[in-house]
Image (spheres, rainbow, N blue to C red):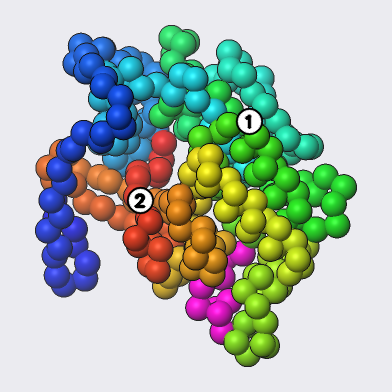
Amino acid sequence: ALASTSNYYVVITINEYALNSGTQLTYNSSNATTLAATTEFDNFNYSSASSSQNPLEVINAHKAYGYGLTGSGQIIAIMDSGFSTSHKELDAKTITTYGTLTYADGTSSTNDHGLFVSGVSAAEDDGDGGIQGVAPSANLHFSSYDQINGNSYYPTHWANATDDAADSNAVVQNNSWGATNSTIATVNTYKTNNGLTNSAALAAYFTAGGLSSNEATVNTYIDALNNYQDKGVVVFALSNTSSLADADAHAALPEFFSQLKEAWITAVNVEITGTSGNETYTRKSAPCGSTGSYCLGGDGWEI
């Protein structure tokens, strides 16, 4: 594939390799083909999307299904806002919740964001003509980042919710939100100019973003994220502001706390247009930037 950047091109060679998980799996190509041909699989790509290729097929989700990997027996933790625990695409799942949830109200994509992320992650392939998610058989764990649950500061709640996800044996915690849109460099400059620790500087920016924080509770949150990585992977979406010169500070927490690099993925949103072998890639989020060594991209545009 050729990726264009200004006046030069970078050749990207994409190879498919089997990952050795220590468990021998049998591939059923018929199952993969059948699942990729369903209406729910097809509907994952928005009807008026510019992408001609289905993002599920681009990431080879159907091939994972051919190996029997559908998320069955696994739990996905989602920290977000605007959830539904009774939506028809989720109603057959076991959904664990922590604390007070902010519920979807159907008025906007922002107010329904948690529901949208839940569907992308794990909407059921139940033949109802709707959509399916990446891991349609997975169960879910919900917590709302914009609830404080009786605490004085938000990071205390985030830490408690993360601990609860770990106790529930969630294998991944998805975070498609951020407490600040400021970049790593911006926070570091503020930290240096004011003689602060990483935690104190981040607390100031989280508070400025409307989520009251202090140094001690940010440290508690970092400890919870670090401990969670003994159980699963933390995924953080990069800012939706594509004009940023680097990753936003919240998604890039491992750049401030190196212990978080153990099992952390930043997610860059890339719109993929064109036919297979003739793709054009357009970044729709902040760049991987400093988080490049643990950053993955996917087409989350118009799905």
Q: Residue 9 location, x and y as percent?
A: 13, 65
Residue shown at the point (70%, 63%) measured from the top left: 218
Is residue 103 rendered to the left or right of residue 72?
right
Which quadrant of the structure image shows residue 191? Answer: bottom right
Q: Secondary structure at mark 1?
A: loop
Which quadrant of the structure image shows residue 294? Answer: bottom left
Q: Residue 40 location, x and y as percent?
A: 39, 19
Question: Magenta stretch: residue 184 in it?
Answer: yes
Residue shown at the point (33%, 17%) measured from the top left: 68
Task: Kindly tell me whether residue 14 is visible in this rendering.
Answer: yes
Q: Amino acid at mark 2?
A: Leu
Residue shown at the point (35%, 45%) measured from the top left: 298
- Where does label 1 land, which residue? 168
Q: Nearer the viewer, residue 18 or 181?
A: 18
Q: Secondary structure at mark 2?
A: strand
Q: Which residues are magenta?
A: 180-189
Label the magenta part by its dominant secondary structure.
Answer: helix
How many other residues sit within 10 Å of disc 1, few (<14), some (14-19) or many (≥20)?
Answer: some
Name the residue at the front extreme: 22
- Where does label 2 land, which residue? 296
Q: Amino acid at mark 1?
A: Ser
Q: Residue 293 location, x and y as percent?
A: 34, 60
Question: Magenta stretch: residue 50 in it?
Answer: no
Q: Nearer the viewer, residue 250 or 283?
A: 250
Task: Kindly tell me whether residue 112 is visible in this rendering.
Answer: no
Q: Is residue 263 above or below residue 128?
A: below
Q: Earlier in the sequence, mark 1 or mark 2?
A: 1
In the picture, which quadrant includes the C terminus?
top left
